[in-house]
Amino acid sequence: MTGRLDGKVAIVTGAASGIGRATAELFVAEGAKVVAADISDEQGAALQRAHEGNLVYVHTDVTSESDIEAVVERAVSEFGKLDIMFNNAGAQGDPAPIAELTADGFDKTLALLTRSVVLGTKFAARQFIAQGTPGSIVNTASAAGLQGNWSAPSYTIAKHAIVGVVRQAASEFGAHGIRSNAIAPGIIRTPIMARSFGIPLDEAEEFSAFLETKLGAGQPIGRLGLPEDIAEAALWLGSDASSFVTGIVLPVDGGATSIYAGSFATDVVAAASEYSAR
């Protein structure tokens, strides 16, 4: 299928790599104009060059309210409107266990993972209402937002909070035709995995392949996820094909959360330690 987003304008945060990049490129391929928001300027500029005329890169710190407001304004000034807001940017945050977690570390994690979603929802909804048009807000939650023991406590708590944002926004904005949903990825082969364990980025692909050999067979579907798996879900939630869908958190996890409480937090630490010791 092609043209599923013909005439649409989308913002994708965290668009310079991983899930965000795969989604931005799929959105363009399906006919959308895209504003790619990130703080990785070199990668963002390269993405813009690769899709000149259909995608613009905007340096955006998603923890900054003014930056998020500005990127929405840029979408409108560049392409005339906004139809889809994909709040995707994120990182692991503070890895400390609860007994050692500082208030500062916790606050920074919430700012990056949860407050950014609240702000993205806020400014996108304002724009949709001002336009008088329906709109779709899609957020990246996590399997760690559905179960414990998938990640560090601050990440787990922040991702659980996104579920609340999604449901509240669905309630508040449904009458305007604004939909609010989230995707809960399982274990996805992205560069964030390498960064989380101090693996050099130039080894990210090698580390990703190593994790596949160690953890893939343990997933119900027999493999780890790819950024493209999440991009396809974001495409559906952003498109008119899901026009009667709002307030959901869609697991895209190869079935992992449907059958067991995730042991990923311990499994991946063991795999990363084995990789680093080679």
Image: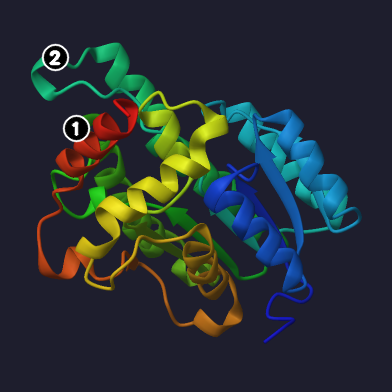
Residue matched to label 1: 153
Which sits earlier in the primary sequence, circle 2 or circle 1?
2
Q: Residue at x 77, y 49 (%)?
A: 75
Q: Where is residue 108? Give x, y as percent.
A: 38, 21
Q: Where is residue 254? Give x, y as percent.
A: 30, 69
In the image: residue 196, left or right of residue 255:
right
Q: Where is residue 266? Give x, y as percent.
A: 15, 39
Query: What colouring method underlies this structural image?
Result: rainbow
Give above or below for 195 relative to 233.
Answer: above
User: How many numbered discs?
Assistant: 2
Give above or below for 27 relative to 165.
Answer: below
Amino acid type, callout 1: Pro
Residue matched to label 2: 100
Give above or below for 3 relative to 74.
Answer: below
Residue 12 or 187: which is nearer the viewer?
187
Which numbered circle lies on residue 68?
none
Amino acid type, callout 2: Glu
Is the residue marked by circle 1 packed among few (<14), some (14-19), or many (20+) residues within 10 Å?
many
User: Which residue of the protein is positioned furthest toward the bottom in this rendering?
Assistant: 1
User: Which residue of the protein is positioned furthest toward the front in this rendering?
Assistant: 278
In the image: residue 201, left or right of residue 215:
right
Give the CA distance from mark 2 to mark 1.
10 Å
Q: Quadrant of residue 156?
A: top left
Residue 89 visible somewhere in the drawing: no
Secondary structure at badge 1 equals: helix
In the image: residue 101, left or right of residue 81:
left
Residue 161 visible somewhere in the drawing: yes
